[in-house]
Amino acid sequence: MCGIVGYLGHREAFDVIVKGLQRLEYRGYDSAGLMLFDGDQVTVSKTKGKVFDLKERAENANAIHGNLGIGHTRWATHGVPNDVNSHPHLSNSKRLALVHNGIIENYQSLKTTLEQRGYTFSSDTDTEVLVNLIEEIQQKEQVKLAKAVRLALNQVVGAYAIVVFDIEQPDRLVTARMGSPLAIGVGEKEYFIASDASPFIAYTSNAIYLEDGEMAVIARDQEVEVRKIKSNKEVDPFIVELELSLEEIEKGGYDHFMLKEIYEQPKAIQDTFRGRLLSDQGLIKMAGVEQHLNTFIEAKRIIIAACGTSWHAGLVGEYIFETYLRIPVEVEYASEFRYRDPVIGPGDVLIAISQSGETADTLAAIKLAKSKGAFVFGICNVVGSSIARETHAGAYTHAGPEIGVASTKAFTTQITLLTLIALKLSQAKESLSHSEIKHLTKALEAVPAKVQEVLELDAHIKAIAEAYFRAENSLYLGRGYNFPVALEGALKLKEISYIHAEGYPAAEMKHGPIALIDEQMPVFVIATRKGHYEKVVSNIQEIKSRKAKIIAIVTKGDQEVAALADHCIEIPEIEESLTPILTTIPLQLLAYYIAIMRGCNVDQPRNLAKSVTVE
Ligand code: F6R
């Protein structure tokens, strides 16, 4: 989950690398480092902390010159975040420098062998083992860098995206990937390497995405050379033109990416259904689903596998699919599914949901389901991501880059896409009538404007945040379609404000969590008029009798809950299955403002990384 960057060209590599690492900080930000080569000397700067701290340290040491360099921003796996464990790691002779994103699983046995051969290690990392393994092979086999990297990687078990520099071949960088993302930017007499394209989009829109098991040599005044790590077979590099714009990955006047992304939701939702939703005809067009209609509608059951917020969207998907499609659906944590020998096979459909398309557990769940003969469909946001490539078919959410670590627009666009898929399949299965589908497509089309209406409650929501930002515990309750929203609201609050938050189905409260309730406890209840309204009102009465503070999300004009709650946030009237898209918005804003008032870094919460590429 670290971010890596490499540069070789005519610019000051320091600027490219520092800016690039700042763009990749969503991947990890507990320490950072870089190495530069100025044609004569190598300088290495490393520090615990953020890329900003690294920049200062390198500038103070005047270690900022060179047209070639590599850099790293870390999310610690092996070894605590400190200067020594930061990357780049150097080989014992200091000839090689290497940055790495991933985990070398057999590093302990490789380390023992290297120690027996006289190698010493200063850090606790698996990466230092890899760089010394490459050096040992270079020396023993008397081979050049690329071959040594290839031979070393053939001994490695685990996941990696790496960039390696060798002072004895200073005109090149060698890079490779297996299970961790990697893109090469191809400019005019310059090359960039990065965990995603954002570090180089300002310089070039031409990129090569390496496949798992491939490595590349980028050398001055030479074409990129790509090879298979196992067979050494040369592969024609495929250059793609990126659609990403610089504007999309900048804050655009907002204080934080999270706030920008919350506010982008009307557009992001519209982009999800653009070209797919023909509401006048009551039709849905989705090529990825159309080609596999029978597989879906004849499925014995649908399993949805995901992690975190995407798992919450999957839970909403379960309610939508079962209601509209009448096919049994199970929602699984990908991390549990992959290890519990699940009963799955031909005739089953697995839908994997992932914003990043890189989540290691979700990827493993997909591979397992495929190996057992299930049909696998992917819902991803990041185009060309590993999950998008690994699935039999899929659809993108088209939400645009999500950079804030807390997922916001990914959630609402995933629900939008799940709704589109369910409607498309209901049409084919005739589980809904044409007029029902037409009604629902119209309702979906109206969602962006209604999300905009909820966003206009920003000042009211901020005032509520003001009243509760000192709380240390909180409870989120919802029923039916809004039970997953309660989970998601609690997750948003805990991950960015560090307030303990529990999400529960409202009726379950009586089976335990009610014991937590006292006058100090804010309870956020989703009590929209459709679906279990009366039942939720009873739950609110129970909370009220225990004197907790009630913040209710209600349908516009609600009187009954308003009379009971301490605060109400009104959302527009909407079709029940679409309420999660609206009810989640105030919870995102509440979490955001509460975290800001507590002085937390909302875009980079402690211990978290955006893309969880380790299991
Ligand atoms: C929470 C959050 C995480 C992710 C989870 C899955 O705000 O961002 O819980 O939802 O790590 O990530 P993706 O969707 O990229 O697979």
Image (cartoon, grey):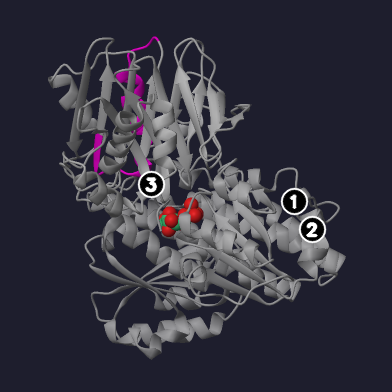
Magenta region, residue range:
10-32
Q: For mark 3, what is the residue?
A: 102
Does 28 appear in magenta? yes
Mark carried by residue 382: none
Most distant residue in the bottom direction: 511
Tell which tag, 3 or 1, sits nearer the viewer.
3
Q: Label 3: how many residues lie within 10 Å, few (<14), some (14-19) or many (20+)?
A: many
Q: Report the front residue among 586 and 351.
A: 351
User: CA gap, disc 3 to disc 1?
Assistant: 31 Å
Q: Report the front residue among 586 and 81.
A: 81
* Residue 243 picture location, percent across and down: 60, 29
The amino acid at mark 1 is Gly
Q: Mostly what secondary structure, the magenta segment? A: helix
Quarter containing the C terminus:
bottom left
Please tell me whether residue 600 is drawn above or below residue 209 in the rendered image. below
How many labels sit on residues?
3
Mark carried by residue 288: 1
The amino acid at mark 3 is Gly
* Residue 600 picture location, percent across and down: 25, 50
* Residue 274 picture location, percent across and down: 71, 43
Q: Label 2: how many residues lie within 10 Å, few (<14), some (14-19) or many (20+)?
A: some
Q: Is residue 234 left or right of residue 519?
A: right
Name which residue lies at 75% across and 48% down: 276
Q: Is residue 582 left or right of residue 548?
A: right
- Considering the numbered disc 2 on the image, is that residue within a helix, a strand or a loop? loop
The amino acid at mark 2 is His
Q: Report the front residue among 532 and 120.
A: 120
Name which residue lies at 23% across and 74% down: 520
Mark carried by residue 292: 2
User: CA gap, disc 2 to disc 3?
Assistant: 34 Å
Q: Is residue 357 left or right of residue 423?
A: left
